[in-house]
Amino acid sequence: MDIWNLLAASIAAEFSDIADQEKALRICIRLLLAVVLGGLLGYEREYHGKSAGLRTHMLVSLGAALFALLPSLAGTSNDDISRVLQGIITGVGFLGAGTILKGSGSLHRVHGLTTAAGIWTTAAIGAAAGLGYGSTAVLSTLLMLLVMSLMRILEQHAAHKRNKNDQPPEA
């Protein structure tokens, strides 16, 4: 066997993890779903000028999907997949913790909690997509978008009421 045949055989062996077209299509659908759903969530954050926008949410979702998908492709047990999910939860928790800031001064306001929670939830959505739970991933994305938009309206209403109550009464 000459070097070229050996090289071709080695390359073919390295890329033999997808045995058939159905499996390849299934992997593509799961990963693309994770990227699209993460993109929707990231776009909402980006649109409102928040940190951790489009690319961050897409990458977190894709990463979680890939980490969830790989053990199931390798044929590992549910216990092992559960441990992988625990690692995703912990790792993304540290990523989210990096977005939380405590302000200084008299107000001592904490910023970034919603961003951290959004990144964490986006990872869960990506993991759901990676494990083949597409309907759950889509429903969770829709619920997250609803929470982000509806709660923003309620928060603005509450802030308006709070500001109105803080003003001294007219004489």
Image (tube, rainbow, N blue to C red):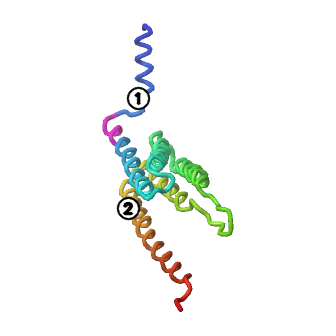
Foreground mark, 2 or 1, reads: 2
Q: Please tell me the numbered disc located at residue 121.
A: none
In this rendering, would 59 be left or right of 36? right
| Among numbered discs 2 and 1, the one appearing first in the sequence | 1
Q: Amino acid at mark 2?
A: Leu
Quick one: which residue is furthest to the top in this view?
2
What number of labels is visible? 2
Distance, label 2 to label 1, CA atoms, is 36 Å
Q: Position of residue 118 (x, y in %)?
A: 50, 58
Q: What segment carries the magenta color?
A: 20-25
Q: Secondary structure at mark 2?
A: helix
Q: Main secondary structure of the magenta part?
A: helix
Q: Is disc 2 in contact with disc 1, using a CB cutoff of under 8 Å?
A: no
Mark 1 sits on what residue? 16
Residue 158 left/right relative to 90: left
Task: Residue under label 2, please give it.
Answer: 142
Give the residue furthest to the bottom. Answer: 171
Q: Secondary structure at mark 1?
A: loop
10 Å neighbourhood of mark 2: few (<14), some, or many (≥20)? some
Residue 141 coordinates in the image, percent (x, y): 40, 59
Asked whether residue 68 appears in the rendered view, the answer is no
Q: Quadrant of residue 23?
A: top left
Residue 152 occupies quadrant: bottom left
Three-letter residue code for mark 1: Ser
